[in-house]
Amino acid sequence: MIETITSPAAMSARAAAFARAGTRVGFVPTMGALHDGHLDLVRTARAENDVAVVSIFVNPQFGPNEDFTRYPRDLDGDLTKLAPAGCSLVFTTDAASMYPRGFSTYVTNDAWSDRFEGAVRPGHFRGVLTVVAKLFHLVRPTTAYFGQKDAQQALLIRRMVADLDFPLQVRVRPTVREPDGLARSSRNVFLSATGRERGVSLSRGLRAAAARFASGERDANALIAAARAELEATPGVSVDYVALVHADTLEDVAHADARSLMLVAARVDGVRLLDNALLSAPTEAAW
Ligand code: PAF
């Protein structure tokens, strides 16, 4: 039976009890609508710690043309999936509790927040970093787990943990994929059957670029063009960006090397999908 905590104060008290008992807490922050990618994080959190705690909170971190109310929500379904994955405590709360009247303090990153996802979704990373900082204070994890699919988010959270001296480890796990390569995402439920097929073009694009890298191509423009060609050949796919960056700095690179990460974002029949891979090791975690 999973323990469910719904108030920040009760979560904080529970975390203090864990700390007093020396309990190692693995933490997986989520917005719910859980899929195999989340469950992989939960299983890893449990395997590497004494308890696995999951938060389910649809944070208002959406960009201007995105609908907070449309984000998929299925708390009962989520709870059913979490127990077998080894989660024993869920923290789920509402926006009024997390952001009471007068809330006005935010966490921002000046270097990386305005690029890629930040450019398409202004304010998004301020929302993410602020809620993750609050969750870290409330849950006091030993280690927090994130998926590589949201690579920019993972890097920003690592940076925040280092810059603001949070006493915890951040672990990033490789993207969990469908058998045909589509990255698992809560947003996949919005794809029609045709959109679902078209969405595979993102991972096909990454694989095409990785194949070029494996055969010796190092020019960033040529590698980006190889990925773009897959996306642009697929009807219904509109590319937001394809970029080749250094995995640790998110700086654009002109010549690819072992640490070059390709980032892809596209709208597929109106649904925004993301994917990324290290060209030198496309199935492995970048960090
Ligand atoms: O990746 C997500 O689901 C969210 O951005 C997170 C980290 C739970 C913050 O709301």
Image (cartoon, rainbow, N blue to C red):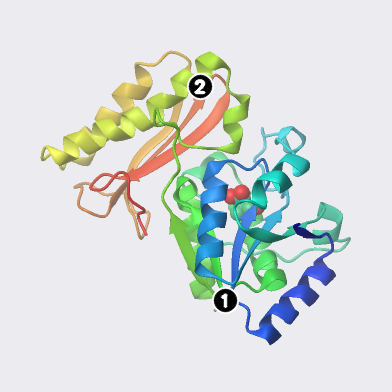
Q: Is residue 169 left or right of residue 86?
A: left
Ligand 1 within 8 Å, label 1 CB: no
Kind of residue at badge 2: Arg
Q: In the figure, is residue 105 to the left or right of 180?
A: right
Pointer 1 residue: 166
CA distance separating discs 1 and 2: 39 Å
Q: Secondary structure at mark 2?
A: helix
Q: Residue 79 in the image: x percent, y percent?
A: 72, 48
* Above or below, 119 relative to 239: below
Q: Residues within 10 Å of mark 1 (few under 14, many from 20)?
A: some
Q: Which of these two is toward me, 56 or 81?
A: 81
Residue 76, x across and y down, in percent: 77, 42
What is the residue that sits farthest to the left in this orientation?
A: 216
Quadrant for the C terminus in the image:
bottom left
Please identify the quadrant where the N terminus is shown: bottom right
Residue that label 2 marks: 196
Of mark 1 and mark 2, the one earlier in the sequence is 1
The quarter holding residue 65 reads top right
Q: Which residue is found at the position 44% from the left and 45% from the top?
A: 175
